[in-house]
Amino acid sequence: MSQLSSLKYNPGAKKNKKRVGRGTSSGWGKTCGRGHKGQKSRSGGTKGVRFEGGQTPLYRRLPKRGFKNYPFKKVYSVLNVSDLNKYEGEIDKTTLKISGLLKILGNGEIMKAITIKADKFSGSAQKKIEAAGGKCLT
């Protein structure tokens, strides 16, 4: 049985990194394959992907349009009326272990009279809960 400490890479699977700038006899000494002078021979001497040779880049030439609502969007955790049958008594977000906003939808039937506290109810959900003898609190 082999041990984890005895595992080795397959031959040729691991290559040593090319070490440049280690003398002229290495073949990659002095200029290290970068040529002579110029921006690309210096460290950090590259332009970004969006650089367009000094002209105003495309992302600045295009106008800004519209309104982005995602920072203000309300995201609800959705629960159907049929899912409430497994609970007893009074139900709220802490009972359901839900953080954020809770919305109750009217899919399915409810068999018990329960009191539920949520941020939003659909019209059909509210009718079904109250018809079963329960209460909807916001």
Image: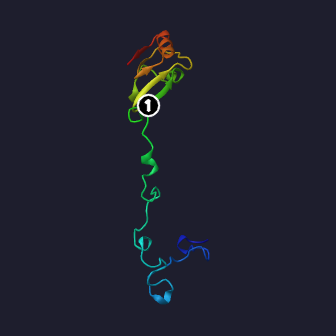
Q: Quadrant of the N terminus?
A: bottom right
- The image quadrant that residue 7 belongs to is bottom right
Front in this rendered view, residue 11 or 53:
53
Q: In this picture, is 122 found above or below 12?
A: above
Residue pictured at 59% horizontal, 72% vertical: 2
Residue drawn at (52%, 18%) of the image = 106
Label 1: few (<14), some or many (≥20) within 10 Å?
few
- Colour scheme employed for the rendering of this structure: rainbow
* Residue extending furthest toward the front: 55
Residue 93, position as x, y percentages in the image: 40, 27
Amino acid type at circle 1 is Val
Q: Which residue in the structure is indicated by mark 1?
A: 75
Q: What is the quadrant of residue 42 in the picture?
A: bottom left
What residue do we see at 44% from left, 52% from top? Answer: 57
Q: On the rendered image, what quadrant is the C terminus found in?
A: top left
Q: Is residue 53 above or below residue 40?
A: above
Query: Furthest residue to the bottom?
Result: 25
Q: Compared to 49, does 36 lie above or below?
A: below
Residue found at x 45% / y 24%: 103
Q: Position of residue 8 (x, y in %)?
A: 57, 74
Q: Nearer the viewer, residue 136 or 72?
A: 72
Image position, residue 123 (x, y; %): 48, 14
Residue 130 pos. (x, y %): 46, 11
Q: Nearer the viewer, residue 28 or 116?
A: 28
* 121 over 32 or under it: above or below: above
